[in-house]
Amino acid sequence: MIEPVMPGFRAGIAAIVGRANTGKSSLLNALLGEPVSVVSPVAQTTRRPVRGILNEDGLQIVLLDTPGIRRASHALSSMLNRTARGLVTGSDVVLLLLDASQAPQDEDRGWMQKLAAEREPVFAILNKTDLGLRRSAYEAAWAEILEKIRSRDPAFAPPAIRWFEVSAATGAGLPDLLAALRAAMPEAPPLFPLDMLTDDPGPFFMADVIRGQINARLKAELPHAIAVAVEQIEDTPEAVAVRATIYVEKPSQRPIVIGNHARMIRDIRRAAEKDLAEIYGKPHKLELWVKVEPNWSRNYWLLKKFGYVSA
């Protein structure tokens, strides 16, 4: 139950969007100071919206981590791209995350094109400034897109945009970004209980942690052929016992995940157990199974089971 609050309380939603591997999950975790979203070097590690909730006196900011946009090469990519684009509407501010160390990509321009047509204020966040800074290139790309729209519609009024230079890795620039986010929140009651850090269901988060460890080891062999579902959780005083199934699409992929003499799946299990123990402050014991499910990425009921679709 949402608690009553004094007049003047501010609350709102900030959607974090952008192409894959710009650091959206890293930014969310850095702003919250807690590992709410799984971070991995593999593109589209985030496959479902993850909400992190920043609660302060008189303020609640709901930070929405979205799947990263990338050129769609398979059905799953297309579905994730549609999900990410649809989450912008209704946000109080949109955080467009850009990789400051690289030149603008087609996916960056695609997001700019979409956000230019929306009404939500935009914070253009140049992340990874510790690796380089190409601000002028991104500002020029934004100006070019606005000019093209104006040439077709002289009455076009672009959304308000502010530029920020940050590094989620080092924390540089985050205080200024947080101050701007606080000021952007409208006067409204809290959207979630004031002691909640995330509304992310535990089983889905645990599955993401396991999948993150698989990606870290098999990103070249199986970057998008893997999905994980937590089937059972038993919380005892000593430890949390978790049974999970790793889904692959082809019989030839199963031995890759298991590895020679089961070394690969053992290493995945141990690393995921370590991550979960650190996150939850309690030992976790994992039981992992590998199942072949052809075309799971096209199976609506399995996608729902994995948490990739909500309706």
Image: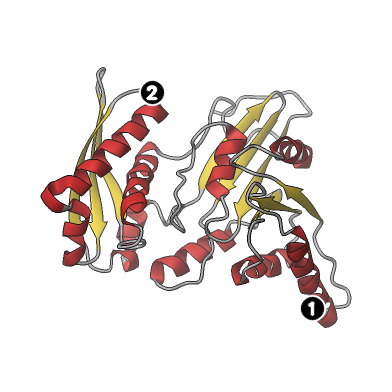
Q: Amino acid at mark 1?
A: Lys
254 shown above or below 181: below
> Which residue appears farthest toward the top when viewing the image?
237
Please report the residue visible at 73 percent of the width from the left and 41 percent of the height from the top: 177
Residue tagged by mark 2? 281
Give the mark, 2 or 1, whose residue is nearer the N terminus. Answer: 1
Determine the residue located farthest toward the right in the rendered image: 154
Q: Position of residue 36 (x, y in %)?
A: 49, 37
- The answer to whether residue 292 is seen in the rendering is no
Question: Disc count in the image?
Answer: 2
> What residue does disc 1 label?
148
Q: Residue furthest front?
A: 131
Kind of residue sitting beneath label 2: Gly
Towards the viewer: 191 or 149: 149
| Image x and y of residue 206, in percent | 35, 40
Image position of 30 with respect to 84: above or below: above
The front one of 280 and 172 is 172
- Which secondary structure lies at badge 1? helix
Q: What mark, if any, has residue 135 been given in the picture?
A: none
Query: What is the x, y in percent for residue 291?
Result: 18, 56
Element at badge 2? loop
Specify whether 34 is left or right of 45: right
Res 226 quadrant in image:
bottom left
Q: In the rendered view, does 20 fall on the left or right side of 228? A: right
